[in-house]
Amino acid sequence: MSASDEALHLTATDLRMATFRLARRLRCARAVDAMSDAQLAVLSTLRMYGSRTITALAERERVTAPSMTNMINGLEEQGYVRRAVDEEDRRRVQVEITDAGTAIVAETIQRRDELLADMLAEHDFTDDELQTLRAASALMQRVVER
């Protein structure tokens, strides 16, 4: 293993550990305690990108179509999503987020942002350190968007 390969591996390990622990702490902050992370992810996708088919949602979330159907059924029963006939192809059904679903996502984001801000405030970071964290988050975003 070359020095750059070793540095890459060590960086990957450090990032994995830090993001896992941070994600676990942030997942505790949500608007609805009974809602799973998978359900929140689907609602977030619909909020961000608009209506999608169940197949498209399943592919994006890397689950089977039957699993996604079950999840959408539950979200629909709770009033967070609705099904609508696709205007371009009336044989297809689109899943849309409702106002109630949008509110759940917005409140969860707010709670998580507040929790993370409180966690950061506990450490009295300098402006330079906060800038470094913002730069690192931009790099991490590039990694996950690929």
Image (cartoon, rainbow, N blue to C red):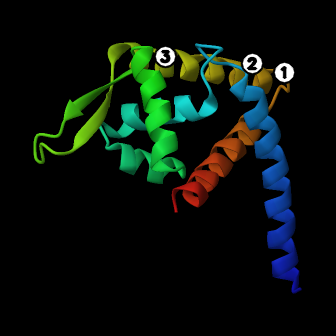
Q: Which residue is mark 1?
A: 122
Say which element carries label 3: helix
Separation of residues labelled 1 and 2 (CA atoms): 6 Å
Marks 3/2 in contact by CB < 8 Å: the verdict is no
- Vertical side of 109 occupied by 55: above or below: below
Q: Residues within 10 Å of mark 2 (few under 14, many from 20)?
A: few
In this rendering, would 74 be left or right of 29? left
Marks 1/2 in contact by CB < 8 Å: the verdict is yes
Q: Furthest residue to the bottom?
A: 2
Query: Which image quadrant: the N terminus?
Result: bottom right
In this rendering, would 48 be left or right of 20? left
In the rendered image, which quarter is residue 69 located in?
A: top left
Q: Position of residue 117 (x, y in %)?
A: 70, 23
Determine if residue 126 is in view. no
The residue drawn where x is 73% and y is 21% is: 28
Determine if residue 109 is in view. yes
Separation of residues labelled 1 and 3 (CA atoms): 27 Å
Q: Position of residue 76 (x, y in %)?
A: 39, 21
Say which element carries label 1: loop
Amino acid type indicated by mark 2: Asp
Q: Which residue is mark 3?
A: 104
- Of the numbered discs 3 and 2, the one sitting upstream in the chain is 3
Amino acid type indicated by mark 3: Ile
Q: Which residue is mark 2?
A: 118
